[in-house]
Image (cartoon, rainbow, N blue to C red):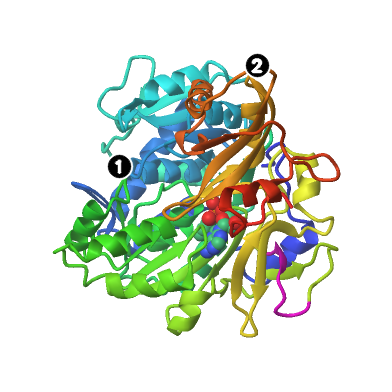
């Protein structure tokens, strides 16, 4: 089934990946039943009091899948999934995989602006939310968003307070009768391995939502390889604390990797140290993943914790830059080994291996998980740099798609004509083949691993009547790495405060993590020779001449 706007791999390349055994033609929903057959009564998912075995999970997913289908959802229909880390997230995702419905992985902080623009772009047919989350009414949000979408969309809700006009997700799960006939029926409806399994989000650019389509074949391959790179096995107890819809905790190796290995995924809705340490102690967690900002808070809190963290073997750290000195502190503080990961929703994943010496694990981001990943480091002229030199990383491979969904103009910028994805990251590759990320050329702000497109913030701030010109730049920050700073010049006689900007963007329904945290008003912005705001100069103004780690907008 071909979904509008999804860019396939060229047929001969796809054939090569099939012949090499990467793509096995099995949808992820059928893998769920393979796991259930192998490990049926072992615990697969833990969420507080809830402990689901592999068989429980498969039966619940089947029940949901059948009810989704009964409400008209089928192959290629897209569903916005905005759930915190909970067992229902896993069951809903698997249910979608079972019948070829495509979950679109939204994040809990997203609001009208993100749900509305992505939902419109992918023509969502349903929105799945919690009733409330962190004091915010997501059910209400989902109904407001649904009313603005191009097609009628169902609102499905996980929680105790489900209103009449919403569908109660837990109410769709039944445990009656013989599950065999349903399973056989769903097997007949299963998508093909080459079909799209899910849509992941990338930091958007100006008005262009960047949606990444991942097929069952490519995602399953990614999961198999990363499970190997991290030595996940039957004894793995993986703790998911980052938002489960993000590619890192979802599948690298994350929740799906733990399940694929026959281990167990423990879900926690927050990375705060005390509940994390309590969960590690209670569930004998062996591995977890974190962005650097989170790993640092754990390392600091561990000194004063009486929790038994002795089961923890590995913390996977990635999503933004981790300084080698910091990396060296985290392992001893948590009494475990760290594995660095450099990855992206667009595909490519690099990991330092479990047996890497400390100097590699602390100062590099490791090697690609597949021997078929292709990496090319180019200079500003587009030509390969000399080995070991810094340049922009381009990549292709069996789990790196060839384009974003439905944005041909953006794709001609983000991908080369021969299919290389331009990561926008500056890297060098060491003599041993390890990738070291040293900055970036793409214009985004990386706030504790959450990617915020500078262009998107600029478009929103430019809409304010006071603003003549705007540029968003990263403000270096010791805790989250970078925060959003906007420089503006104003129309004559106008005034603008940071609180004013924050209120205007919040009113527009923009996620809180994107709201600017610093505002600088200048009489005029400095410009580059072609007349764009000069972000290098602006960044220097912020750092007093030191310059941030990243080189934005160059
Ligand atoms: C992960 O995925 P995304 O899609 O949120 O962000 C990808 C971008 C990369 O292009 C790079 O700019 C940055 O995040 N990044 C890193 C990094 N890992 C990712 N920058 C410096 N050092 C690192 N170790 O962030 C992601 C996806 C899967 C696994 C891990 C991370």
How far across and how far down the image is residue 446, in percent?
54, 50
- In the picture of the structure, the residue carrying the numbered disc 1 is 178
Q: Which residues are magenta?
A: 386-397
How far across and how far down the image is residue 500, in percent?
51, 23
Q: Secondary structure at mark 2?
A: loop
The numbered mark at residue 493 is 2
Specify whether residue 325 is painted magenta: no
How far across and how far down the image is residue 356, in percent?
46, 82
Front position in the image: 465 or 196: 465
In the picture provided, is 311 more to the left or to the right than 520? left
Picture quadrant of ligand 1: bottom right
- Residue at the (68%, 51%) spot, across then down: 442
Visible residue check, residue 202:
no
Specify whether residue 391 is painted magenta: yes
Badge 1 or badge 2: first in the primary sequence: 1
Which quadrant: the N terminus? Answer: top right
How many discs mark residues in the rendered view?
2
- Residue at the (36%, 72%) spot, across then down: 329
- Residue at the (70%, 79%) spot, across then down: 388
Q: Is there a contact, CB below 8 Å, between mark 1 and mark 2? A: no
Determine the CA span between mark 1 and mark 2: 73 Å
In the picture provided, is 178 more to the left or to the right than 467? left
Answer yes or no: disc 2 within 8 Å of ligand 1.
no
């Amino acid at each position: 089934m071909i979904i509008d706007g999804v860019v396939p791999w060229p047929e001969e390349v796809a054939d090569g990946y099939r012949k090499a055994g990467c793509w096995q033609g099995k949808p992820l929903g059928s893998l769920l039943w393979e796991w259930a057959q192998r490990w049926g009564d072992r615990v697969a998912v833990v969420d507080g009091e809830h402990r689901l075995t592999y068989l429980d999970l498969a039966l619940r997913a089947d029940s949901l899948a059948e009810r989704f289908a009964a409400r008209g959802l089928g192959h290629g229909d897209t569903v916005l999934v905005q759930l915190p880390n909970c067992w229902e997230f896993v069951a809903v995702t698997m249910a979608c995989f079972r019948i070829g419905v495509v979950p679109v992985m939204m994040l809990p902080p997203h609001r009208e602006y993100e749900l509305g623009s992505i939902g419109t772009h992918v023509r969502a047919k349903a929105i799945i939310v919690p009733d409330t989350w962190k004091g915010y009414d997501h059910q209400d949000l989902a109904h407001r968003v649904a009313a603005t979408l191009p097609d009628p969309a169902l609102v499905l809700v996980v929680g105790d307070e489900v209103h009449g006009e919403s569908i109660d997700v837990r109410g769709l799960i039944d445990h009656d009768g013989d599950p065999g006939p349903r399973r056989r029926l769903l097997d007949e409806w299963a998508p093909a391995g080459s079909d799209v399994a899910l849509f992941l989000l990338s930091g958007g650019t100006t008005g262009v939502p960047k949606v990444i389509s991942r097929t069952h074949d490519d995602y399953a391959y990614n999961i198999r390889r990363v499970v190997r790179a991290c030595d996940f096995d039957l004894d793995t107890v993986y703790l998911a604390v980052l938002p489960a819809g993000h590619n890192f905790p979802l599948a690298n190796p994350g929740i799906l990797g733990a399940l694929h290995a026959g281990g167990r995924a423990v879900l926690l809705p927050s990375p705060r140290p005390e509940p994390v340490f309590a969960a590690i102690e209670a569930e004998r967690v062996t591995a977890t993943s974190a962005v650097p900002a989170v790993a640092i808070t754990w390392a600091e809190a561990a000194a004063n914790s009486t929790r038994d963290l002795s089961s923890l073997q590995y913390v996977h750290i990635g999503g933004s830059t981790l300084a080698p000195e910091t990396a060296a502190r985290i392992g001893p503080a948590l009494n475990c080994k760290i594995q660095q990961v450099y990855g992206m929703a667009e595909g490519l994943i690099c990991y330092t291996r479990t047996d890497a010496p400390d100097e590699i694990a602390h100062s590099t981001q490791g090697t690609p998980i597949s021997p078929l990943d292709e990496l090319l480091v180019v200079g500003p002229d587009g030509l390969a740099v000399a080995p070991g030199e810094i340049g922009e990383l381009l990549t292709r491979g069996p789990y790196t798609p060839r384009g974003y969904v439905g944005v041909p103009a953006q794709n001609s910028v983000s991908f080369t004509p021969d299919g290389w994805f331009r990561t926008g990251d500056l890297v060098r590759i060491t003599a041993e083949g390890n990738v070291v990320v040293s900055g970036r050329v793409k214009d985004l702000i990386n706030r504790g691993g959450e990617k915020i497109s500078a262009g998107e913030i600029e478009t929103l701030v430019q809409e304010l009547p006071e603003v003549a010109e705007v540029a968003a730049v990263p403000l270096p920050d010791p805790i989250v790495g970078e925060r959003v700073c906007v420089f503006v010049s104003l129309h004559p006689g106008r005034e603008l405060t940071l609180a004013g900007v924050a209120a205007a963007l919040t009113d527009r329904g923009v996620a809180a993590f994107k709201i600017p945290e610093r505002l600088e008003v200048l009489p005029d912005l400095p410009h580059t020779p072609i007349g764009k705001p000069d972000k290098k100069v602006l960044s220097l103004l912020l750092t007093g001449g030191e310059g941030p780690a990243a080189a934005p907008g160059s």
